[in-house]
Each structure stands twice: as C-alpha cells, then as structure tokens.
Image: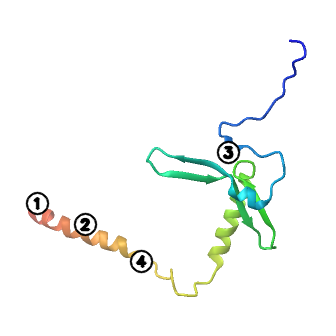
C-alpha cells in the first residue's frame, strides 16, 4: 500500500470514556455524560464523564471517571475521613440501637411463638 499511513486513534468501548483533545472549561466537563442509557431493570442511568471535586485549599478540578479513578477514590476516602471527624451537633446518630431491626425481631418472635407452642 503506497501512500497509506496508519494513524492510531485510541478508541474505547464506550464513547463517553474518550477525552476531548481541545481544552475545555470545568463547566463544559461537568455537563458531559459517559453513560446515558436505560439499564436491564428499566431505570435510566446517567454517569458523568467528569467528577467535579472542590479541594479545601479552594482548588476545583474536573476528574475524568476513568483516567483519574485513583484521584476520585482518594477524594472520596478523604471526605469520609473528614465526615467521621465532624461533631454531631444535633445529637443525631448517637444512639446505637436500630429501631427497624428491633421491630423486625419482635415481629419474627411473635410469629414464631405460636409455632413453638404448637410443637412443644
């Protein structure tokens, strides 16, 4: 083949995973969707191509969901760590009992009692 040059274009299985070659603003990146389609259950799924992260020093970054996955994980880990350190001002979350679990256990006990009485 004379005169043919192969140009390798990095293609991905999902067109939403591609990163634009021209520079974009954070607002433009925030609008991009990697996935916008119904799933097998019929729910309509939308996954952003970029996650916008605001750092404590005031810096804002648009992190690509594939290329910057490690940085996104680190940001989520940091947010969880900081959230655990927040004081509970409203008194919320200080009780360790689970009311829903206790109600379910009571219902199961009441349903099982007649069966157990009938057996013994």
- In the drawing, what numbered circle is on residue 16? 3
**In the rendered structure, which disc, 4 or 1, sits on the residue that comes first in sequence?**
4
Mark 3 to mark 1: distance in Å?
Answer: 62 Å
Mark 2 to mark 4: distance in Å?
Answer: 18 Å
| Tag 1 residue | 119
Q: Residue furthest top?
A: 1
Closer-to-camera residue (10/21):
21
Rendering coords of residue 74 (x, y %): 72, 60
Mark 4 to mark 1: distance in Å?
Answer: 33 Å
Mark 2 to mark 3: distance in Å?
Answer: 48 Å
**In the rendered structure, which disc, 3 or 1, sits on the residue that comes first in sequence?**
3
| Tag 4 residue | 97
Rendering coords of residue 22 (x, y %): 84, 48
Decide: few, some or many residues near mark 3? Use Cα within 10 Å; few <14, some 14-19, many ≥20.
some
Which element type, helix, strand or loop, lies under badge 4?
Answer: loop
| Tag 2 residue | 108
Decide: few, some or many residues near mark 1? Use Cα within 10 Å; few <14, some 14-19, many ≥20.
few
Residue 21 lies in what quarter of the image? top right
Above or below, 116 relative to 48: below
């Amino acid at each position: 083949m004379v005169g043919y040059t192969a140009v390798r274009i990095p293609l991905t299985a999902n067109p939403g995973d591609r990163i634009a070659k021209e520079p974009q603003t954070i607002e433009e990146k925030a609008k991009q969707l990697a996935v916008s389609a119904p799933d097998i259950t019929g729910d309509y799924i939308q996954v952003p191509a970029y996650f916008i992260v605001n750092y404590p020093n005031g810096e804002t970054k648009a992190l690509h969901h594939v290329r910057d996955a490690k940085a996104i994980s680190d940001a989520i880990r940091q947010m969880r760590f900081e959230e655990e350190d927040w004081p509970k001002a409203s008194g919320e979350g200080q009780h360790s009992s689970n009311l829903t679990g206790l109600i379910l256990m009571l219902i199961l006990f009441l349903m099982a009692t007649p069966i157990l009485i009938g057996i013994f």
